[in-house]
């Protein structure tokens, strides 16, 4: 059974606000923020898109699993994951064993607005459209659902409101 002193893993599609919410949430809880993508970039001294280009998506997924293993057993972390972390069952198990998994959602149109000018997401770079986001979301929805302890919509909410909602819902979850 997890407790609130365990870590919190933020999952969700690209552009659902994991990084922004993670920063605020970790500040509020006095927890250590781990930005998985950023740690991987620093550890390998390569941008995510270069890792995808040179070694492929599977290799990147293995790096994600390796990092989740490194974080295992550490308390009081807020971990902002990459949007595809749920694609491996092993990752879902690692996150659920070590804390609460919070699934952030947003409508495809809102995601599109948030990510459309960013060139650092290899899986969207050549397919930047609401339709493609919808397609990827529907392929991934079940993975996110099966990983999550709680699901929080970020549509039309401020970051403070989202953080507040996560804290309340996790407290309820613990009761
Ligand atoms: C990915 C999401 C990205 C990054 C990589 C793959 C995905 O992270 O890990 O480009 O498969 O959804 P963000 O969700 O932080 O954009």
Image (cartoon, grey):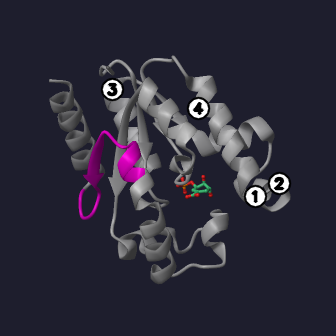
State the SS at label 2: helix
User: SS of the residue at dot 3?
Assistant: helix
Q: Reading the chain from its start, which is encountered first: label 2 or label 3?
A: 3
Decide if residue 17 is in sight here.
Answer: no
Image location (x, y in percent) of residue 167: 23, 34
Say which label, 3 or 4, has the lower sequence index: 3
Foreground: disc 3 or disc 4: 4
Vertical side of 114 occupied by 39: above or below: above
- Residue 17: give x, y in percent of width and height: 41, 54
Q: Are marks 3 and 1 in contact (CB under 8 Å)?
A: no
Task: Tell me the distance, in whole angstroms, between the alpha carbons under discs 1 and 2.
Answer: 6 Å
**Mark 1: is the Cβ under 8 angstroms from ligand 1?**
yes
- Of marks 2 and 3, the one in the foreground: 2
Q: Mark 4 — residue? A: 68
Question: What is the distance, in whole Å, between disc 4 and disc 2 at their CAs?
Answer: 20 Å
- Marks 4 & 2, CB-CB < 8 Å contact: no
Residue at the image point whose x is 26% and y is 55% from the top: 158
Rendered image: mark on residue 29: 3
Cα distance between the residues tagged 4 and 1: 19 Å
| Cα distance between the residues tagged 3 and 4 | 21 Å
Quarter that holds the C terminus: top left
Where residue 33 sits: x, y (%)? 49, 32
Sequence-first disc among 4 and 1: 1
Compare marks 3 and 1 and give the one earlier in the sequence.
Answer: 3
Decide which of tag 4 and tag 2 comes sooner along the chain. 2
User: Cβ(mark 4) to ligand 1 < 8 Å?
Assistant: no
The percent position of residue 152, horizontal first and vertical second, equals 27, 50
Residue located 59% across and 40% down the image: 36
In the image, the segment drawn in magenta is 144-157
Say whether residue 72 is left or right of residue 175.
Answer: right
């Amino acid at each position: 059974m997890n407790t609130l002193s365990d870590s919190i893993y933020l999952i969700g599609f690209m552009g659902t606000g994991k990084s922004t919410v993670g920063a605020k949430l970790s500040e509020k809880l006095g927890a250590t923020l781990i930005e998985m993508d950023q740690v991987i970039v620093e550890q390998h001294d390569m941008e995510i898109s270069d890792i995808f280009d040179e070694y492929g998506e599977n290799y990147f997924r293995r790096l994600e699993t390796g990092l989740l293993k490194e974080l295992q057993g550490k308390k009081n972390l807020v971990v902002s994951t990459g949007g595809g972390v749920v694609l491996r069952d092993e990752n879902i198990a690692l996150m659920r064993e070590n804390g609460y998994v919070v699934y952030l959602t947003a409508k495809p149109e809102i995601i599109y607005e948030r990510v459309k000018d960013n060139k650092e997401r290899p899986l969207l770079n050549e397919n930047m459209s609401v339709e493609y986001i919808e397609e990827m979301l529907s392929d991934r929805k079940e993975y996110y659902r099966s990983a999550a302890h709680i699901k929080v919509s970020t549509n039309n909410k401020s970051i403070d409101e989202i953080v507040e909602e996560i804290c309340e819902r996790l407290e309820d979850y613990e009761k």
